[in-house]
Amino acid sequence: GQQLNQSPQSMFIQEGEDVSMNCTSSSIFNTWLWYKQDPGEGPVLLIALYKAGELTSNGRLTAQFGITRKDSFLNISASIPSDVGIYFCAGSTQGGSEKLVFGKGTKLTVNP
Amino acid sequence: EAGVAQSPRYKIIEKRQSVAFWCNPISGHATLYWYQQILGQGPKLLIQFQNNGVVDDSQLPKDRFSAERLKGVDSTLKIQPAKLEDSAVYLCASSFPGWSPVPSGNTIYFGEGSWLTVV
């Protein structure tokens, strides 16, 4: 089945630093989504991307849908302690949220 | 707007026992999903319903897992008999309207999950 390779697995950064994480696939996706999951909670959608090359921001978060449609990245600028959590990329070959495939997540730790 | 409701939040059972999880999606959401999330991994789709019909259950281990959404609203996921490897968080999610000409109309919303430990 389709797999998403998400990296890095974990990151330890100082408050105020910028963060970058990415996701790659051997398959072409029509949708790329980025989620954040806090301990004991379900994933919460951060950014949704629907067109190749699309660059979308949500506050301090910016994500891009790769031109090849096989990758996406998420940047977080000026990190703060509440950014701590696990970030997941997810993609759909069908569009929208149909048959989403998730990466294994990037665990982010922010030191005050 | 109320979110996706799930219960129970936590369950510990012995292997070979059975367990059932319940989900009530966001009001009006036609599509309901059950995902399994094993510790350290991303969620994996088990089954997708649109109204009361199954759209995709290709990754559901049908020898032990079953799910239903009889009236097209709430849903139950059952595991019988449970195995140790079934220990995971079972996430329910929903989306509206199920199909949309605008991709963003298919945004899915997750519940908090039901945490299962099989001992």
Image (spheres, rainbow, N blue to C red):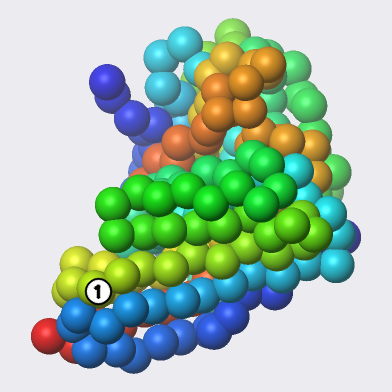
Q: Residue at x 74, y 17 (%)?
A: B53
In the displayed structure image, the side of residue B69 where residue A28 appears, left or right: right
> Which residue matches tag 1?
A79
**Disc 1 residue crowd, few under 14, some 14–19, many 20+, Cα 10 Å:** many
Using the image as rendered, state which of residue B110 and residue A64 is in the foreground: A64
Question: Residue B60: where, in percent of width, then height?
Answer: 77, 47
Q: Is residue A110 left or right of residue B32?
A: left
Residue shown at the point (40%, 50%) measured from the top left: A57
x, y percentage for residue A80? Answer: 18, 72
Q: Is residue A29 left or right of residue B20?
A: right
Q: Is B111 displayed left or right of B43 in the figure? A: left
Depth check, front residue: A72 or B79: A72
Q: Secondary structure at mark 1?
A: loop
**Looking at the rendering, in which quadrant would you find the N terminus of chain B?**
top left
- Chain letter for the residue marked with disc 1 in the picture: A
Residue lying at 17% horizontally and 74% vertically, measured from the top left: A81
Classify residue B98 by image quadrant.
Answer: top right
Pick the front one: A33 or B60:
A33
Above or below — where is A57 with respect to B49? below
Relative to A35, does residue A83 appear above or below in the rendering? below
Image location (x, y in percent) of residue B21 = 49, 40
Location of residue A34 in the rendering, given as x and y in whole percent from the top left corner: 51, 55
